[in-house]
Amino acid sequence: MKTLIIHPDDRSTDFLRGIYRHLKDATVITSDVSQIRLHKLIRSHDQIVMLGHGSPSGLFNVARVGSKFFTIGSVEADMLRDKQCIFIWCHADQYVHRHGLRGLSSGMFISEMLEAVYCGVSGSLKQVDHSNEVFAQALGAALAKEGSYDQIFESVSREYEVLIAENAIAKYNLERWQLIG
């Protein structure tokens, strides 16, 4: 399976590199990719993993990946329809539902202290960082095994669930981790 990782370069999402660090033969784009090249890459890959900051309207373009405000927005939705997709950004689930897509998705995902405060979830910076690290490692390990999305979803949920007894950030994120479609 040909995998494309779209992860606009942003220091605040560096922890997401753990998701694809050990994937073999993945194409990784992080910056300075034209809209035309981005679309060619999406069309030529079977699995698309999209990571970073975003909103219900799509994945933010913070590193010149594409030429629009969103690296992944409404224009790209039709290209993603027949792909195996993983959408990890805040409120990605709303994007997936709006466009009738399927795949693994995050809802609101707390990855920074300000997001925890905004969501009214108590925790420390250490808990946020630990939550980020465990989630990324669990998803990366599950992807490396190349199982079905049901298996990946269950594997990540099991690994991440270990934190919820003492980490409200992980509990909040796990409640919003989903397999859509």
Image (tube, helix red, strand yellow):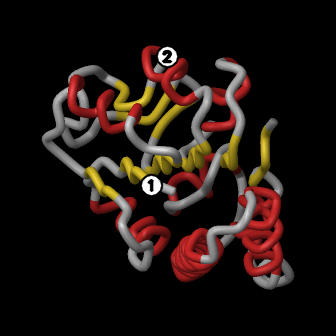
**Residue 148 badge:** none
The residue lying at 36 percent from left, 51 percent from top is 7
* Label 2 residue SS: helix
- From the viewer's side, name the closer residue of 105 and 84: 84
The residue lying at 59 percent from left, 44 percent from top is 85
Residue 34 placement, left or right of 163: left
Where 14 sits versus 150, above or below? below
Quarter of the C terminus within the rendering: top right
Q: Looking at the image, tell me whether mark 1 or mark 2 is earlier in sequence order.
A: 1
* Residue 152 figure quarter: bottom right
- From the viewer's side, name the closer residue of 136 and 154: 154
Q: Of the residues tagged 1 and 2, which is closer to the observer?
A: 1
* Residue 14 figure quarter: bottom left
Name of the residue lying farthest toward the left: 32
Question: Label 1 is placed on what type of residue?
Answer: Thr
- From the viewer's side, name the closer residue of 86 and 113: 86
Residue 91 screen position, x and y as percent? 63, 37
**Residue 3 badge:** 1
The residue lying at 43 percent from left, 15 percent from top is 75
Where 152 sits versus 68, above or below? below
Residue 62 placement, left or right of 33: right
Q: Residue beneath label 2, please?
A: 74
Question: Label 2 is placed on what type of residue?
Answer: Ser
Name of the residue lying farthest toward the top: 75
Q: Are there few (<14), some (14-19), or many (20+) residues within 10 Å of tag 1?
A: many
Residue 50 screen position, x and y as percent? 47, 46
The residues bearing labels 1 and 2 have C-alpha atoms spaced at a distance of 21 Å
The residue lying at 72 percent from left, 69 percent from top is 170
* Label 1 residue SS: strand
Residue 106 screen position, x and y as percent? 66, 48
